[in-house]
Image (cartoon, coloured by chain):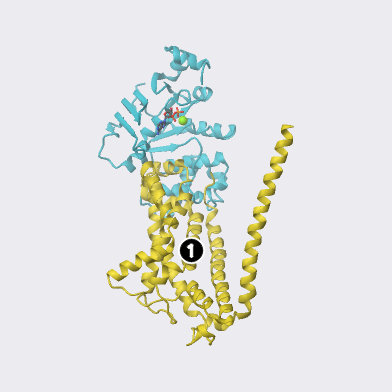
Chain colours: A cyan, B yellow
């Protein structure tokens, strides 16, 4: 089976002030697969995800060079609208950040600001995405309640629904289960496996077992550099680099 | 031995805190009590329903409706103006230039300085400008002057609430395609709504209680202003003039006016608390 490359990161360097945070990063993310970025804390995983979403633009201290090709378009050097680029990627963060509004409006927010305001259509879409995030059954009778009335696990699934609602083809998730209980974590993992048929998914984690459960493709990072990458089976069971081997054996976190 | 010391220390500081609380509460009660004691007997329907008649400040009939209406117009107008200028600035600081730390911190420093300048300086400054462009004392001049001196208060009060919003909320909003403007006016405003209400209340209190800034700019009159270009009376100045009277009876009326001023602020505070609670339920707790 030949695989298509969805995201192609070439010679990416990121400096924040004097700190060189990402060093010559080259990563190929295959389409419709789950790519897991592994690495000890502080190695630059979060920064890498934010660069993909151009959230790094917010910080004037940060300088990024290199290229990130998504479907042949270099999102670092493009004339496309930054907001359209961000809409192509759903984002899940380490802990859920629901918006200060009702459950319904959390999912509808992205649709509304993109100009879709017809009540009937909105309602259909919201239901669709809540179902996709396996949340509909739990919230269908309380759509007008504040999003914060949900449990943390439900909030994270709400954030997933909100991200899916703007119709991205990529999902970026930064340790999406680290604040969740085991049941909610398992629900998110299952969801990812289900969603990968239609989405390209990039998950940052430092939980090895999670990587083993969901990864198709693994990238191992250390101190801002990519040490090794490839199909999950190869990297997780037969790593070529000494650093990777040490990490997999639990020599450091 | 060590534990004993810590126990004594704990006991000592609790005593200090208790003493401070007692002093503050007692002082407050004394103030309220003495205002009520002197003002209540003079408080009448006439006070709040009539304008002063000739010779009011020497004991003749009339009321302070001129000052009540003048103060309300002035404080509401100034607060609204200050809100429309101040809230965008606070949002701009916390959404658009959030990461330009040097700039934001400089602004905070300057705003804190502005908050500390006595209002009479604003009044004198505004008066100088009014003289320069040939403007007479008026409701509008008073409103603008008060607005200028409460703008820094609104900005800083809002800013203190907005800066507690974690970056994650902004990133989450941006990631579904929101612009920074949408983050500011659709997300941050909602999240900080209770803070906005507090900020408005705080500045309304300052606006309605201030005498110095309006002295030169709004002037004083026995009439209720019917347009922005007419001078306006204000409660604090009305209190001041009545206190200046040699007659005991008029002095007591000043205390009645103080009760009215306090009641206005109290009513508004209760109303806004009720209002903000209805919105608070959506605010995310971090
Ligand atoms: N804005 C910034 N300015 C300076 N250093 C930063 C900034 N953001 C992140 N870093 C540093 O970059 C490194 C990588 O951080 P991060 O991407 O959060 O790592 P991870 O997610 O893998 O734990 C850390 O050493 C962190 O201190
Ligand atoms: Mg991280």
| Residue B5, image x, y percentages | 71, 36
| Residue A128, image x, y percentages | 46, 44
Residue A200 seen anywhere in this rendered image of the structure: no
Q: Residue furthest left?
A: A79
Q: Residue furthest front?
A: B246
Q: Is mark 1 within 8 Å of ligand 1?
A: no
The residue closer to the viewer here, B256 or A96, is B256
* Numbered circles on residues, count: 1
Label 1 crowd bin: few (<14), some (14–19), many (20+), radius 10 Å: some
Residue corresponding to mark 1: B206
Letter of the chain that mark 1 sits on in the rendering = B
Where disc 1 sits, the SS reads helix
Quick one: quadrant of the N terminus of chain A?
top left
Q: Is residue A86 above or below residue B156?
A: above
Residue A162 seen anywhere in this rendered image of the structure: yes
Residue at coordinates 33% horizontally, 75% vertically from top-left?
A: B136
- Give the left or right position of residue A79, taking residue A234 as reference: left
The residue closer to the viewer here, A210 or B271, is B271
| Residue A220, image x, y percentages | 43, 21
Residue at coordinates 30% horizontally, 32% vertically from top-left?
A: A71
Q: Is residue B19 above or below residue A48?
A: below
Residue at coordinates 46% horizontally, 40% vertically from top-left?
A: B168
Q: Is residue B152 above or below residue A85?
A: below
| Residue B11, image x, y percentages | 71, 44
């Amino acid at each position: 089976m030949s695989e298509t490359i969805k995201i192609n990161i070439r010679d990416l360097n990121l400096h924040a002030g004097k700190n060189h945070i990402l060093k010559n990063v080259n990563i190929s993310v295959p389409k419709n697969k789950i790519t897991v970025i592994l690495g000890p804390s502080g190695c630059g995983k979060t920064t890498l995800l934010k660069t993909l979403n151009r959230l790094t633009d917010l910080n004037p201290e940060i300088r990024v060079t290199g290229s990130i090709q998504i479907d042949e378009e270099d999102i670092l050097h493009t004339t496309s609208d930054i907001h359209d680029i961000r809409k192509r990627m759903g984002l899940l963060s380490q802990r859920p950040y629901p918006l200060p509004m009702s459950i319904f409006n959390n999912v509808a927010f992205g649709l509304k600001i993109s100009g879709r305001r017809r009540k009937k259509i909105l309602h259909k879409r919201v239901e669709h995405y809540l179902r996709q995030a396996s949340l509909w059954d739990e919230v269908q009778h309380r759509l007008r309640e504040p999003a914060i009335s949900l449990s943390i696990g439900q909030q994270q699934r709400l954030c997933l629904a909100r991200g899916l609602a703007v119709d991205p083809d990529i999902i970026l998730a930064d340790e999406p289960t680290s604040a969740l209980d085991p049941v909610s974590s398992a629900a998110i993992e299952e969801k990812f496996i289900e969603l990968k048929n239609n989405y390209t998914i990039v998950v940052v984690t430092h939980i090895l077992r999670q990587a083993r459960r969901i990864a198709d493709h693994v990238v191992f990072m250390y101190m801002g550099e990519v040490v090794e990458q490839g199909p999950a089976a190869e990297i997780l069971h037969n790593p070529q680099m000494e650093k990777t081997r040490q990490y997999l054996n639990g020599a450091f976190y | 031995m060590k534990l004993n010391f810590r126990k004594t220390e704990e006991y000592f500081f609790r005593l200090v805190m208790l003493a401070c609380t007692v002093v503050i509460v007692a002082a407050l009660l004394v103030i309220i009590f003495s205002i009520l004691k002197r003002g209540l007997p003079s408080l009448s329907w006439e006070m709040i329903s009539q304008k002063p008649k000739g010779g009011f400040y020497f004991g003749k009939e009339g009321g302070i409706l001129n000052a009540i209406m003048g103060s309300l117009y002035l404080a509401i107008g100034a607060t609204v103006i200050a809100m429309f200028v101040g809230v965008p600035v606070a949002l701009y600081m916390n959404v658009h230039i959030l990461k330009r730390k040097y700039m934001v911190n400089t602004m905070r420093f300057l705003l804190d300085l502005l908050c500390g300048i006595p209002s009479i300086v604003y009044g004198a400054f505004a008066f100088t400008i009014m003289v320069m462009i040939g403007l007479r004392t008026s409701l509008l001049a008073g409103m603008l002057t008060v607005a200028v001196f409460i703008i820094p208060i609104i900005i800083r009060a809002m800013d203190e609430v907005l800066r507690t919003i974690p970056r994650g909320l902004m990133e989450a909003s941006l990631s579904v395609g929101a612009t920074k403007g949408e983050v500011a006016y659709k997300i941050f405003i909602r999240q900080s709504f209770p803070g906005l209400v507090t900020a408005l209340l705080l500045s309304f209190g300052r606006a309605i209680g201030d005498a110095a800034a309006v002295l030169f700019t709004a002037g004083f009159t026995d009439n209720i202003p019917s347009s922005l270009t007419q001078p306006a009376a204000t409660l604090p100045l009305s209190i001041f003039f009545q206190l200046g009277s040699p007659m005991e009876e008029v002095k007591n009326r000043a205390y009645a006016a103080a009760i009215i001023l306090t009641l206005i602020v109290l009513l508004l505070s209760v109303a806004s608390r009720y209002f903000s609670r209805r919105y608070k339920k959506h605010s995310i707790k971090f």
